[in-house]
Image (cartoon, grey):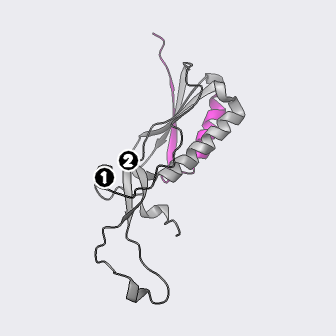
Amino acid sequence: MVRKPNSMYRNLAKKAYTRKEYMGGIPGVKVVHFDMGNLTSEFPMEVSLVVDESCQIRHSALEAARMSINRKLNKELGRMNYHLKLRTYPHHVLRENKQATGAGADRVSQGMRLAFGKAVGTAARCQQNQKIFTVFSNPASVEKIKDALRHGGHKLPSPTHLVIEMKQES
């Protein structure tokens, strides 16, 4: 079965469909890790990837962006010099009313009868200016982090921008 284009699921058109205890047959979330790199050290700077529009991001897109960012940071900085955090979780269940295609499909297909749809995946519902990924690191590596986050942002369905913040010393 061919995966449908992301443009079908990008907009926040309907209410969130998240009550998994009432559903069956929901595919598992593809996101493997939500925290990567050095999880024990405190870093003075954080760089965040922020979405510009409200949208739904499929779990496969989150995983692709996570893998891209983590691979680039691991190669450029080393595993102990950053902490990458994925800040959203794909709670929203996506549904699709499957249609039969090909010869004789009109005899098999039900059309819009019982058109509620089957669960085909999950997505994270993101609001405008919400942080999706955050990298904690040292100020010396800011350019490499910006490049990695920019590459990962291309895998998301919304335009993105970066926000750089320094932690306050107490």
Give the magenta-colored segment's residue range: 141-170
Asked which quadrant contains residue 45, the reply is top right
Q: Is residue 153 visible?
A: no
Comes first in the chain, label 2 or label 1:
1
- Check contact, mark 2 vs mark 1: CB within 8 A: yes
Q: Residues within 10 Å of mark 2 (few under 14, many from 20)?
A: some
Task: Give the farthest residue toward the top.
Answer: 170
| Amino acid type, residue under disc 2 in the picture | His
x and y, in percent, of residue 17 in the image: 31, 54
x and y, in percent, of residue 44 in the image: 55, 19
Residue closer to the observer: 153 or 60: 60
Q: Please report the residue visible at 45 percent of the width from the left and 37 percent of the height from the top.
A: 87
The label number, if any, that marks residue 91 in the structure image: 2
Residue 74 drawn above or below residue 45: below
Look at the numbered disc 2 and give the secondary structure of its residue: loop
**Residue at the spot of label 1:** 16
Look at the numbered disc 1 and give the secondary structure of its residue: loop
For the residues labelled 2 and 1, the Cα–Cα distance comes to 8 Å
| Amino acid type, residue under disc 1 in the picture | Ala
